[in-house]
Image (spheres, helix red, strand yellow):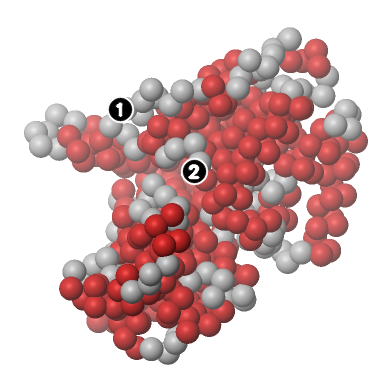
Amino acid sequence: MNHVAKFWPLSDVHLARTDSGLVYNSKTLYRLSIEATTRNFSNNPRCTNYRTALEELPLGIRLDVLSEMCDYPSLVDVQWQILSDPLLISDFIKNFSSDLTPLVQCLQWLQSVKKSLPIQLFRKYKKLIDEKIRNGGLHRFDYRCGLRIGTFLTETGWLVEAIGILQLTQQHAKFATAEELAVLRQLMRAQTLAGRLINAYKTYHRMKRLLSIVSQQTLMMRNMPGMENEVQRLLDLQSAVCHSFALYHFENLNFVTSYEYGMQSLSMISERSPSRLLVGVLRQHARACTANQMYAKATCMLKLALGLVAQEYGRKSALYAETLEDLAIILLACDQVSQSVDVYADAQHIYMNLFGARNLLHSLAQGDLAYGLCLQAYVTGCRDRAFDHVAKAVENYKRILPPDHRMLTQVRRLRVTMEMFKFESSELDGYDMASFHHKEIDSLAE
């Protein structure tokens, strides 16, 4: 750690000061060090010593410093150049998957100053693949690098760039194996969320053929000694694939088929499955249950999901906010309008605490951007008027927004959400979710 201490500005920025105010500062010494390092660097952004020292820092500290660079215009080029390395981004995602808030903050900041990191990552990733084809490339560069980046960009709303990277990654993965299926699973998810259902349909059929191959491999390995971990990995992959099928059919308005695939996915989950996968399966299955008017079951799925997220990621995480947004939609579907608005507001407070004021910009924001329009349509009280309201909004957004704008993408998918709503109260069979208060749900560890 000597190389860290050499350029770490604690001594000259803090320890030499006699101001007793530092003693009562609520920030940790680590946080003050991060801020001091970045502030000094911003005063001399061309200093090669700072750049070299930053690249030698441990991965976690490096990510924190890069995040602190946000809002420093003098460091935009430095930050953009460092983060344009797909291998570094892949390492960040691999090591800090439980909380990638700093990385999202960097993407938002760079996008706001017209430096699109997702596009640059696509270009750099393509260059890495070309180099690997020509001369073998780097030893640690494999399909998992693109898979991690594509998955991250899908989850954070940069869908077009995610699709591009995942298509390149498919070429990089071994043909007709679990590797290709894992990539195609995320590719179809990105295509579906982007509204490219024709492309998703082609991916879907390729995945079905590969799924049968992987299922046969799993059966063959079940009784082989020493293959328990590999069998578990393949079972989790099959569960994830069924989860993606459930999403695809849901967006195609095939709610019964979506429900069936959700049940298949749940049946393959075990106590050893990744918590992120289980949360995703529960959230999607809750939506399918709501669309099929199984409100009690949807409530149960969401309670489990919220408890698991609270345990694994905390109640201040982005994933907790996303799950609250699911709850807000289900409450709206159950005609619990005021409760729905309150829950959605709780989710937005989490986003604001995580990402700050930049999350108010529709071109950068995380979360459900179409909820307000959805609420406006629902309170019209009539199915025809609601759909007409959404159709007019879509046309308006088409005129003023780029075709791949994240707001427009979400608004286009709003018709599917509206199909979950039953505008005749009698169809709800008297189901009441008023007793469902997310703040009273204990984490599964409690």
Most foreground residue, 147 or 372: 372
Could you say whether the residue bearing mark 1 is in a helix, strand or loop?
loop
Residue 329 image-quadrant placement: top right
Could you say whether the residue bearing mark 2 is in a helix, strand or loop?
loop
> Please, what is the three-letter code of the amino acid marked with disc 2?
Ser
| Image disc number at residue 271 | 1
Q: Is residue 173 left or right of residue 352?
A: left
Any part of residue 10 in sight? no
Residue located 27% across and 40% down the image: 233
| Labelled pair 2, 1 in contact (Cβ < 8 Å) | no
Q: Position of residue 166 (x, y in %)?
A: 45, 61
Q: Position of residue 103 (x, y in %)?
A: 46, 61
Residue located 77% across and 27% down the image: 337
Whether residue 133 is situated above or below residue 283 in the rendered picture:
below
- Foreground: disc 2 or disc 1: 2
Whether residue 77 is situated above or below residue 198 in the rendered picture:
below
Residue located 35% across and 60% down the image: 30
Q: How many marks?
A: 2
Crowding at label 2, few (<14), some or many (≥20) Cα neighbours within 10 Å? Answer: many
Most foreground residue, 222 or 3: 3
Q: Quadrant of the C terminus?
A: top left
Crowding at label 1, few (<14), some or many (≥20) Cα neighbours within 10 Å? Answer: few
Residue 53 image-quadrant placement: bottom left
Any part of residue 284 in sight? yes
Q: Quadrant of the N terminus?
A: bottom left
Residue located 33% across and 55% down the image: 94
> Please, what is the three-letter code of the amino acid marked with disc 1?
Glu
Q: Is residue 334 left or right of residue 218?
A: right
| Image disc number at residue 317 | 2
